[in-house]
Every structure is written in C-alpha cells, then in structure tokens.
Image (cartoon, rainbow, N blue to C red):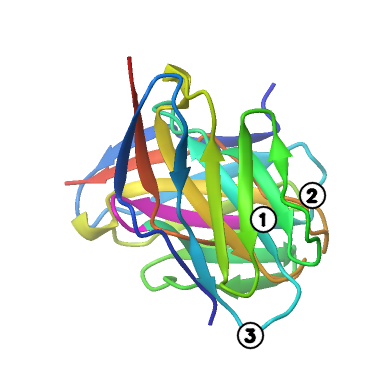
Amino acid sequence: AQTVTQSQPEMSVQEAETVTLSCTYDTSESNYYLFWYKQPPSRQMILVIRQEAYKQQNATENRFSVNFQKAAKSFSLKISDSQLGDTAMYFCAFMIGGNTPLVFGKGTRLSVIA
Amino acid sequence: DADVTQTPRNRITKTGKRIMLECSQTKGHDRMYWYRQDPGLGLRLIYYSFDVKDINKGEISDGYSVSRQAQAKFSLSLESAIPNQTALYFCATRRGASTDTQYFGPGTRLTVL
C-alpha cells in the first residue's frame, strides 16, 4: 500500500520569509502523481501544486515550488515571500493513476507570523 | 454556484441516530469520493464510486454505507451514529480515469453526542 508521511505537524514562519514543508512517500510504482493541498480556516481544500513523477522539472506556481527527489521519494513544498494568507493546514497527497483515489499525509499546520 | 456541494454544512446528532450526508456535483464527473478528516490523521478514504453501478470500499468503511443515486449525487449514511464518528467529512469528484486533481466540496462538520 502507498503511504505518505509529513513529519512536521506544525511550523511557523515570519511574514516575507521562506519556509519548506516536507513530504515523503512510499511506493513501488515508477509513474505517479503528487499534490499539495492547502486548507485555510474556511476548511475548503485548495490545490496548490501538482507534479508528475515522469517529469524531472520541478513544478512551480507563483510563490509555491516543489523539490521533487524521485530516488529519495521526497516531495517538499517551498513557499517564498510568505504571506499571512498562507496560514493553513497543508496536505501532501499521492496518486498512482486515474483509477486510484488520492492518499493523503497527516498534514502540517503552518502559521505565518506578522 | 459551487461545482461540488455538500448538505448539511454542519450537523449535531445523538448516538444511535441515523444520519445522511449528501453530495451533489455539476462538473459532470463520473468518479466521486467520500473522505473523513480527523485532527492529526489527515484525510482518510471511506468509499468511492466510479459510476452509478460501481462502488468500492475505502480504508475506513466500517460503520458507513453509501448510495450513488445518479451520476451527480453520492450520499454517505451513518446507520447508527457513534461519538467516534465525529469528524469533518469531504466529498470529492474527478473526471474519468484522468490524472487531474480531485475537486472537493466545502465539507460537513458532524458532531455525534
């Protein structure tokens, strides 16, 4: 079975600084898909970024980027120029293919401090 | 209007009561999912459905049942609610066998007293 591990239950960062959230996963598959979701206090699940395992280039979405290390099975999220609105739970998720549901990590609670 | 809706948004019930959580979507997706979120445990899959006639158990299906009334509707039932089922419940959808993301509803906060 595939598993996703987020080893940092809580983190904090000063406004305008950079923070990195860690995620590791376990699978024997060679092709799969990785996601980071944000859950603000409104509790809505919002997709932040997506990465296909067959792509070597790290995905980037504005201030959000990933460091995907396939051999190490690591998928960390970097948030640059942190803003107060980035305060949220962040979930790492994994999917093998279109016929499999997402598998989630336990989440990291990020607080951005003014 | 939201593409994936859940009703109710919040519900308080008592132990032993039967309760149904409903999910509707206008995205035209054939795949629908029910997840449960607990503090410190992330989101865990309860049931999922590929179409009206194809329903599958997830990681934590005990104590729950589902009904796919139509492509757009997927309901989750607790036949006899217990306090341990107090949680945030999410419905999600996805298009076919695509590798796109799943789209989530706003969640239902359920409290069982």
The amino acid sitting under disc 3 is: Ser
Q: Which mark is residue B29?
A: 2
| Chain designation of label 2 | B
Within 10 Å of disc 1 (Cα), the crowding (few <14, some 14-19, many 20+) is many
The amino acid sitting under disc 1 is: Met
Q: Which residue corresponds to mark 3?
A: A28
Question: What element does badge 3 sit on?
Answer: loop
Q: Are marks 1 and 3 in contact (CB under 8 Å)?
A: no
Q: Is residue B110 visible?
A: yes
Q: Position of residue A27 (x, y in %)?
A: 59, 79
Q: Are marks 1 and 2 in contact (CB under 8 Å)?
A: yes
Q: Which mark is residue A107?
A: none
| Chain designation of label 3 | A
A38 up-or-down from B38: above or below:
above
Q: Residue at x 68, y 54 (%)?
A: B69
Q: Which residues are magenta?
A: B32-41
Q: CA distance from mark 1 to mark 2?
A: 8 Å
| Chain designation of label 1 | B
Question: What element does badge 1 sit on?
Answer: strand
Position of the N terminus of chain B by quadrant:
top right
Q: Position of residue B5 (x, y in %)?
A: 60, 34
Q: Residue at x 44, y 26 (%)?
A: A17
Q: Which residue corresponds to mark 1?
A: B32
Q: In front: A99, or A2? A: A2
**Marks 1 and 3: same chain?**
no
The amino acid sitting under disc 2 is: His
